[in-house]
């Protein structure tokens, strides 16, 4: 499937871009980074809850992708492999005292809204309501344990299938479904109480 990721050549097929990057084409790799950078950053921010830590981890994700692109198994979706790397780095970071302290002390930094729910065709009052809903949802996701926040991001933001999430997380498909059900019920209860 062609992806419009810029450049003079126009739309680029992701698999062609990956193949070129595997052959050492730095421009092709930059296009992959441009395509996934914000998504990886938002995913990591959901987990570590500190923007500088998420930025550092995102950079490390792409360093590892570049180093290990030759090991990438083309049977997996590239984004699944990419998010496995991001997940592992985030979980490692959360095991260190620095990441835990930062996430407890700071939460999300001002100005960062990782959720992109707004409808550009909405009226100003609808946009204001959407911003408020995004803020409330971001707070609710921030309050979740990192594992649930990760699942929320993969399913609702990255729109990964249950099978893809199971690959990324190492969970069974059934466990993913149960956790997503818990997330939905928690969010419903929270927003029902605030309505």
Image (cartoon, grey):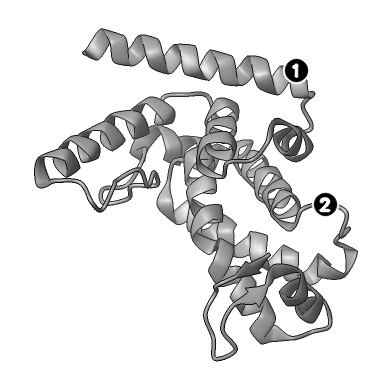
Look at the image and tell me in which quarter the C terminus lies.
Answer: top left
Mark 2 Cα within 10 Å, few/some/many (few <14, many 20+)? few
- Asked whether 122 or 44 is in front, the reply is 122
- Asked whether 137 or 59 is in front, the reply is 137
Q: CA distance from mark 1 to mark 2?
A: 20 Å
Is the C-beta separation of discs 1 and 2 under 8 Å? no
Coordinates of residue 122 in the picture (x, y in percent): 20, 46
Left of 119 or right of it: where is 54?
A: right
In the rendered image, the residue lying farthest to the left is 125
| Residue bearing mark 2 | 76
Coordinates of residue 40 in the picture (x, y in percent): 56, 54
Indicate whether 15 appears above or below 138.
below
Indicate whether 29 appears above or below 159.
below
Residue appearing at x 71%, y 44% in the figure = 88
The local secondary structure at tag 1 comes to helix
Image quadrant where residue 133 sits: top left
The local secondary structure at tag 2 comes to loop
Left of 93 or right of it: where is 153?
A: left
Residue appearing at x 36%, y 34% in the figure = 138
Left of 93 or right of it: where is 46?
A: left
Image quadrant where residue 18 sits: bottom right
Residue appearing at x 45%, y 13% in the figure = 186
Indicate whether 27 appears above or below 59.
below
Mark number, residue 174: 1
Residue appearing at x 32%, y 47% in the figure = 109
Mark 1 Cα within 10 Å, few/some/many (few <14, many 20+)? few
């Amino acid at each position: 499937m062609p992806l419009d990721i810029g450049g003079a050549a126009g739309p680029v097929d992701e698999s062609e871009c990956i193949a070129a990057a595997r052959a050492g084409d730095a421009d092709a790799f930059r296009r992959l980074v441009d395509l996934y950078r914000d998504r990886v950053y938002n995913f990591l921010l959901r987990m570590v809850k500190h923007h500088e830590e998420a930025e550092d981890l995102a950079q490390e994700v792409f360093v590892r992708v570049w180093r290990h692109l030759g090991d990438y198994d083309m049977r997996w979706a590239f984004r699944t492999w990419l998010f496995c790397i991001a997940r592992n780095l985030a979980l490692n970071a959360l095991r260190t005292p620095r990441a835990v302290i930062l996430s407890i002390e700071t939460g999300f930094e001002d100005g960062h809204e990782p959720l992109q729910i707004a409808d550009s065709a909405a009226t100003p009052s609808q946009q204001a309501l959407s911003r408020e809903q995004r803020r409330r949802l971001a707070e609710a996701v921030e309050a979740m344990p990192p594992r649930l926040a990760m699942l929320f991001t993969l399913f609702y933001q990255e729109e990964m299938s249950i099978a893809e999430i199971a690959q990324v997380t190492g969970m069974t498909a059934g466990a993913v479904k149960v956790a997503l059900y818990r997330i939905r019920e928690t969010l419903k209860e929270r927003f029902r109480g605030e309505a």
